[in-house]
Image (spheres, grey):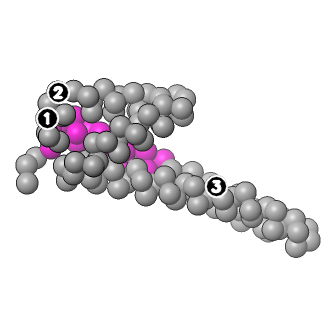
Amino acid sequence: MTEPPKGVKTSAYIFFAYAGLLVLGLCAVIGSAILGATSGGNGQDVTAALIGPGIGGCVLIIFLALYAGVGYGLLKMMKWARIAAIVLSVLALCSFPIGTALGGYVLYLMFQEENKQAFA
């Protein structure tokens, strides 16, 4: 297997860093669920306090797996990873300001000729 170009490695590490940020977000969601569940009240209040964090936590886990998987795929030079990186980077553009900066930079890297040819 060939060594990935520097731009592809950089993109992979950005995806791993973004997955790390999602882990922090997941910890915050779990913390809010614990606080909501232990804040007292009747059973309906506890159920309502857990629904939002439960749904949010599931969404975060899905995106965490996607970002980590794409980062791994980029490091292993899997052809599908470049397309997935482009799609996730376009989605990340909506997350102003960090997602916009990282998504834009990964798009720039993925469309460089050297990196395009590495996946050809």
Answer whether labels 3 and 1 touch (C-beta < 8 Å).
no
Give x and y (percent) for residue 49.
79, 61
Q: Quadrant of residue 5?
A: top left
Which residue is at a point 66% across and 59% down the rendered structure image? Answer: 55
Answer whether labels 1 and 2 touch (C-beta < 8 Å).
yes
The local secondary structure at tag 2 comes to helix
Residue 9 drawn above or below residue 20 = above
Which residue is more in the foreground, 30 or 89? Answer: 89
Q: Spatial distance from mark 2 to mark 3, Cα to Cα?
A: 38 Å
Which residue is at a point 82% across and 62% down the rendered structure image? Answer: 48
The residue indicated by pointer 2 is 113
The residue segment tinted magenta is 4-21
In this rendering, which labeled residue sits more in front, label 2 or label 3?
2
Task: Characterize the magenta stretch by its predominant secondary structure.
Answer: helix
The residue indicated by pointer 3 is 56
The local secondary structure at tag 1 comes to helix
